Amino acid sequence: MIEGGEVRALFRAARPAGLVLALGMPAMGYGMGLWSHASGPWRLGALLGVLGAWALLNAGTLWWNAALDRDESGAVFSGEGERPGSAGPAGLGALGAAVAVAWAADRGVGLVCLGCALLSLVYSHPRLVAKGHPVLGPAINAVGYGFLSPLAGWLVAEVPMDGRTLGAFLAMTLFVLGSTFAAQAFQREEDARRGYRTLVVTHGPAACLGAARSLTLTSLGAVATLAALGFYPRLCLLGMPAFVVADRWLQRWRRQPDGGSARWAGGWLLRMAGGGLLLIGLAYLDAVHDMLTRGEPAAGAATAAGRNPAIDRP
């Protein structure tokens, strides 16, 4: 039986402060699918199953990682405290439960969740230690969080894949890749002590933050370009200045010694996430305006260049 102190340690290691961001990825994929095809919300029970599975997946990934690193008190959104002794078994159990819950919600989602679970195992396996590789570690984060997680939500929506949805997923993949480099910027000493060959160890914090800035700005530039071309609502362009706030924070962060701290990383990530929520809000505001003026759902069917002939209306 797990004692109360161990339960509290597991809870802290699951980084509950970051759970909203982890669940936001499949939720975004679901919403993107519905918006692009002007479809109303449905299969909400399956969506709840996906969110439950991703909560378990997130916890399992972090516990499995904590079992490898032994102490993640300095990581983004983590609190102070000892590594839970049961982190390894708890991580494996949570990953298995996540796949089971996802499979019950939707078989396609179950396969995607299985892929994410396998990536988590490879990422923090003590013999593989992919997280310590300069390319493989960031790539696993980018694929798992940035592409497969939104894809899981999109599968629940049961709509055809289109170019702008794929574009959004690829932009998210680039964004997560950049965030991964940012998250390691202040961990040079710890990564070096563990024998990792991450970018911060080989090239220093400045290179990490430079890569993070380049990748995230490329992601945002792609979204802004697609909005300007009319594949996304042009109203979304009004939200782009919000990311200037995040970029200024990053510029201040780059001036901190030794890559700053988890506070700097968390502050930047929250500001970037706030800008993303603003873009989503503006897209749905545009959809509400179309619905009120047209008298019927329009959403993605009403953008200037992203119309879907199967659902388009005169």
Image: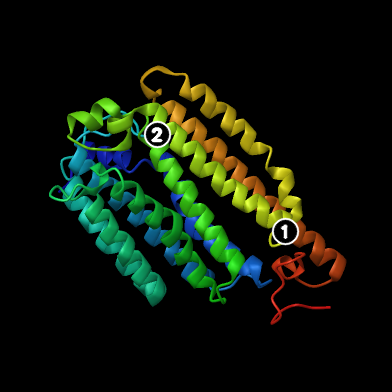
Mark identifier at residue 204: none
Q: Quadrant of residue 72?
A: top left
120 on left or right of 150: left
**Residue bearing mark 1:** 229
Q: Is residue 281 above or below residue 112?
A: above
Percent position of residue 130, x then y: 23, 49
Marks 1,2: beta carbons within 8 A = no
Percent position of residue 84, x then y: 20, 39
Residue sitting at 51 percent across and 68 percent down? Answer: 154
Q: Is residue 301 above or below residue 130?
A: below
190 on left or right of 142: left
What's the residue type where badge 2 is placed?
A: Cys
Residue sitting at 30 percent across and 28 percent down? Answer: 80
Q: Would you say residue 289 is visible in this rendering?
A: yes
What's the residue type where badge 1 is placed?
A: Leu
Percent position of residue 112, x then y: 37, 67
Query: Tag 2 or tag 1, which sits nearer the N-term?
Result: 2
* SS at badge 1: loop
Task: Tell me the distance, in whole angstroms, between the alpha carbons under discs 1 and 2.
Answer: 32 Å
Mark identifier at residue 208: 2
4 on left or right of 244: left
* SS at badge 2: helix
Residue sitting at 12 percent across and 49 percent down? Answer: 127
